[in-house]
Amino acid sequence: MRKLLITGISGGQGRLVARRLCSRWQVTGVDRSPWPSPPPGVTVHTLDLRKKRFENVLRTERPDAVVHFGFVRHFRSDPALRHEVNVEGTKRLLEHCVAWGVKQLLVLSSSYVYGALPNNPRYMDEDHPLNASRTFPEIRDLGEVEGLASTFLWRYPEIATVILRPVNVLGPYVKSAIRRYLRLGVQPTVTGFNPMMQFIHEEDLAKAVELALENRLRGIYNVAGAGAVPLKTAIAATRGRPLPVPGPLARLMVEPLFQLGLYEFPSSALDFLKFPCTVSDRRFRTSTGFEPEHTLGDTFASIA
C-alpha cells in the first residue's frame, strides 16, 4: 500500500479523509491536537509541524503523498500564532517533502483567497487575481501559503503538487467559518445586499481530495458543490433568521464585539456578506470527473 501523511488529521476534514482512504493507503497523521480513537490502520502523532519531531516522522514513514490540512483558520486565534503555524509550518513542510522524497503534495486552500469585491465576475476561474488581502487581512497568511505552494509547484516538477480552493464547506464535523455563522440562530446581514454563495458538503470535499490524489493532479483547482444560492436562502435553509444591519453601522458594531470576544468574525468579513465570491470548478471536474454526491438541500440539512 502507498503511504499517505495527513497534517491536521484530528480536524473534521482530516478525519473524514483518513477514514475514506485508510483501506487503500497506509495513513499516518500529525496534529497538535490528539485523535483519541482513530480507525484501525491509522497512526496519529500528536506534535507540531514546526518541531524537529515532525521531520522525524517523515524520515521514518517516508510517505509517498502528503495532504496538508494543518492550518489555524479560526479568526479568534492569536494572529502571530496563526501566521507562524500556517506560513512557517508550511515552509518547513515543503522543505521536508523535498528532503524525504515525497512524490505528491496536496495543499487545501480556500476560495476566500479571491476576496469578495463588487466587481468580481460571476464565476472566477483559477487565473483570477487573489484579492483577499486587500480587504480581509485576517486571511493574508493563507495567501502567503498559496504563494509558497505555487512557487514549490514550479520549482519541483518531479513532485505532483496540487492546490485545492474549495468553496464554503458545511457538514457535521468540519468547524468552518460559514458553519459557525449559519449556526448563530440570528445572522447579521448587510441591508440591501444578498450575494450569491456556493457550498460543498464535507464528504464531497473528502471525495475531491481522493480524486486529486488518484489522478496525480498538478496545479491549482477550484472545487465547488451543487450550485449557488443567495445568502438569505442559505440562512432560511439552515433555520436561521437574517438580521439586516445598515453597512456603516454593521462595521461600527461588529469590530468592537469581535475585539471583546462576543462575535466570532472581524468587520472585514462583512464584505463576504455583501459581494460575490463564486468560482468556476470546470477545470477540476474536467480533470477528475468529479460530481458532488450531496445536493444543496443535503448540505444545508447537515447543520440545520
Image (cartoon, rainbow, N blue to C red):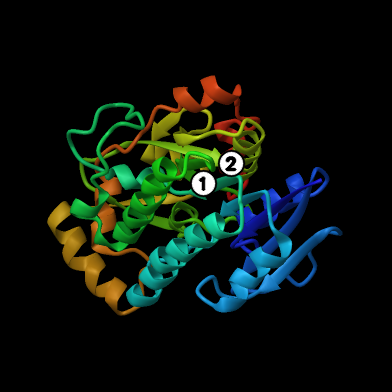
Q: Amino acid at mark 1?
A: Val
Determine which residue is flagged by label 1: 169
Q: Is residue 130 above or below residue 38?
A: above
Q: Is residue 251 above or below residue 216?
A: below
The tag on residue 205 is: 2
- Assess disc 2: are there few (<14), some (14-19) or many (≥20) residues with their C-alpha within 10 Å of its C-alpha: many
Q: Is residue 74 above or below residue 294?
A: below
Q: Examine the image and state in which quarter residue 47 appears.
A: bottom right
Question: Dot 1: what SS?
Answer: strand
Horizontal side, residue 192 vs residue 226: left or right:
left
Q: Amino acid at mark 2?
A: Leu
The residue positioned 55% from the left and 33% from the top of the image is 217
Question: Dot 2: what SS?
Answer: helix
Marks 2 and 1 close (CB-CB < 8 Å): yes
Q: Is residue 209 above or below residue 123?
A: below
The residue positioned 23% from the left and 45% from the top of the image is 131
Task: Name the front one of labels 2 and 1.
Answer: 2
The spot of residue 103 in percent (x, y) is 61, 45
Horizontal side, residue 35 vs residue 279: left or right:
right
The spot of residue 64 in percent (x, y) is 67, 49
